[in-house]
Image (spheres, grey):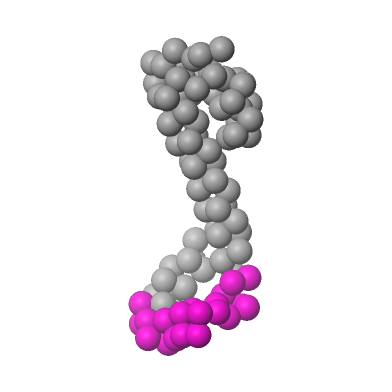
Amino acid sequence: MNADAILQVSVSANQKLYDKITRGDGVMCDALRELMKDEFDKTVTETKETEKKDFAMNMLNGNEPLSKITKYTKLSKEEVLELAKKNGITVVQ
């Protein structure tokens, strides 16, 4: 996308200014935050899903029962069973 290329060139050419705007006082300027909102939201959602699956894997490897895994990870029974199958783990009922 052209806008992405323009933004990347602008950031590269003005790195000190962008650092000051985004990190200077610990608060990102409103315009930049709004510009990046969708990407931030997507990243947060993906990170939460990854963390839930990592936690479920730890519980599966610890032989925790399926009911406990679904309760603490908020993953569905089907999601946990699929994760276990994909990784060759027997699920404790």
Viewer can see residue 14: no
Q: Position of residue 4 (x, y in %)?
A: 48, 66
Q: Quadrant of the C terminus?
A: top right
Main SS type for the magenta part?
Answer: helix
Residue 69, image x, y percentages: 56, 27
Q: Residue at x 56, y 66 (%)?
A: 36
Frontmost residue, 5 versus 80 = 80
Residue at 50% across / 31% down in the picture?
Answer: 56
Which segment is the magenta one?
Answer: 12-34
> How many numbered badges does the structure rendering display?
0
38 relative to 33, above or below: above
Q: Is residue 79 magenta?
A: no
Membership of 24 in magenta stretch? yes
Q: In the picture provided, is 35 more to the left or to the right than 10?
A: right
Location of residue 88 in the rendering, given as x and y in whole percent from the top left corner: 39, 16
Return the x and y of residue 15 as percentages of the image width and height.
Answer: 37, 81
Identified at 41% across, 16% down, the residue is 89
Residue for point 59% across, 72% down? 33
Q: Quadrant of residue 27?
A: bottom right
Inspect this view and state whether residue 70 appears.
yes
Q: Is residue 17 left or right of residue 68?
A: left
On the image, which quarter does residue 35 sit in? bottom right
Q: Nearer the viewer, residue 43 or 1?
A: 43
Q: Nearer the viewer, residue 36 or 48?
A: 48
